[in-house]
Image (tube, rainbow, N blue to C red):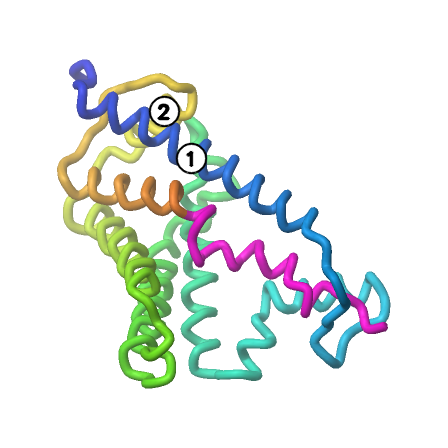
């Protein structure tokens, strides 16, 4: 392949900054939350009385969205599709971190399309909720829509790369691994790949300061991580 140009070098630097900056920013936010004192215990009743009970409650909340199910089963369905589709997609993308795809990921690859469909369906459900439910639309701000549109951009551009304009996945992996080493190699593909990577990097950079941080934030919610007095 030809030597990487200035645009590819800039994208490589942006990739390293966004990923490492996102990790450091997330760590700092979690450290700050962990060291923020709670003036009074405000557990959401019925609350557990032991630390083991609190851990179990947080686990059920993280994997099953129990509070959301009780509030709105329809929204719960959209969130389950979104979060588990996103989780599966992230696991599949871990293969780009190794020169050879790990054997434990290989059986999962054929199901990537279903994960993308679930992720897209969940995003559309949540976007429709923002637009069609009056009370939700009233409290929504522009950033609420922009986060959903950014995720949709990532999913749609990724689907285009998979089914319409495929690229050399091995070379993309080489580019990402080199970027994480603060190095640069040539990047294959056209505008669809640049759009996909650009949207992903924007998401990574903004994640520590955006509303999507509610994921790890659940662990520090005083209504859920406090024991009953």
Disc 2 and disc 1: Cα gap in Å?
A: 10 Å
Question: In the figure, 129 relative to 37: above or below?
Answer: below
In the rendered image, which quarter contains the N terminus?
top left
Report the residue at 37% width, 54% height from top.
Answer: 112
Q: Quadrant of residue 137?
A: bottom left
Question: In the figure, 5 relative to 27: above or below?
Answer: above
SS of the residue at dot 1?
helix
| Magenta highlight range | 207-229
Graded by Cα atoms within 10 Å as few (under 14), some (14 to 19) or many (20 or more), the crowding at tag 2 reads: many
Report the residue at 25% width, 24% height from top.
Answer: 10
Report the residue at 29% width, 55% height from top.
Answer: 150
Query: Which percent across, then down, holds residue 116?
Result: 33, 59
Query: Which percent across, then down, holds residue 85?
Result: 42, 60
Q: Mark 1 points at which residue?
A: 19
Query: Which percent across, then down, holds residue 206?
Result: 39, 46
Report the residue at 20% width, 18% height from top.
Answer: 4
Q: Predominant secondary structure in magenta?
A: helix
Asked whether 218 falls inside the magenta stretch, the response is: yes
Front position in the image: 129 or 92: 129
Front position in the image: 190 or 226: 226
SS of the residue at dot 2?
helix
Query: Which percent across, then down, holds residue 205?
Result: 39, 41
Say left or right for 56 vs 92: right
Q: Mark 2 points at which residue?
A: 179
Graded by Cα atoms within 10 Å as few (under 14), some (14 to 19) or many (20 or more), the crowding at tag 1 reads: some
Q: Do the residues labelled 2 and 1 touch (CB within 8 Å)?
A: yes
Q: Mark 2 or mark 1: which is in front?
A: 1
Asked whether 30 falls inside the magenta stretch, the response is: no
Determine which of the numbered discs, if any, sits on residue 177 in the image. none
């Amino acid at each position: 392949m030809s030597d990487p140009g200035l645009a590819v070098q800039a994208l490589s630097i942006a990739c390293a900054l966004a990923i490492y900056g996102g990790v450091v920013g997330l760590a700092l936010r979690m450290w700050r939350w962990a060291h923020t004192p709670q003036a009074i215990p405000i557990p959401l009743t019925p609350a557990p009385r032991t630390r083991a009970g609190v851990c179990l409650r947080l686990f059920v909340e993280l994997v099953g969205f129990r509070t959301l199910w009780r509030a709105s089963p329809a929204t719960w369905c959209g969130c389950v599709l979104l979060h588990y589709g996103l989780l599966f997609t992230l696991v599949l993308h871990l293969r780009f971190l190794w020169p050879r795809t790990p054997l434990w990921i290989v059986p999962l690859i054929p199901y990537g399309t279903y994960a993308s469909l679930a992720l897209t369906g969940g995003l559309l459900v949540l976007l429709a909720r923002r637009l069609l439910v009056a009370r939700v639309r009233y409290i929504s701000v522009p950033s609420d829509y922009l986060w959903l549109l950014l995720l949709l951009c990532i999913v749609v551009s990724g689907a285009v790369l998979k089914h319409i304009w495929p690229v050399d996945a091995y070379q993309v992996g080489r580019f990402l691994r080199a970027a994480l080493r603060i190095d640069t190699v040539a990047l294959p593909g056209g505008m669809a790949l640049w759009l996909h990577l650009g949207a992903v990097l924007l998401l990574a950079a903004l994640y520590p300061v955006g509303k999507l941080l509610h994921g790890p934030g659940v662990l520090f919610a005083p209504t859920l991580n406090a024991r009953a007095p």
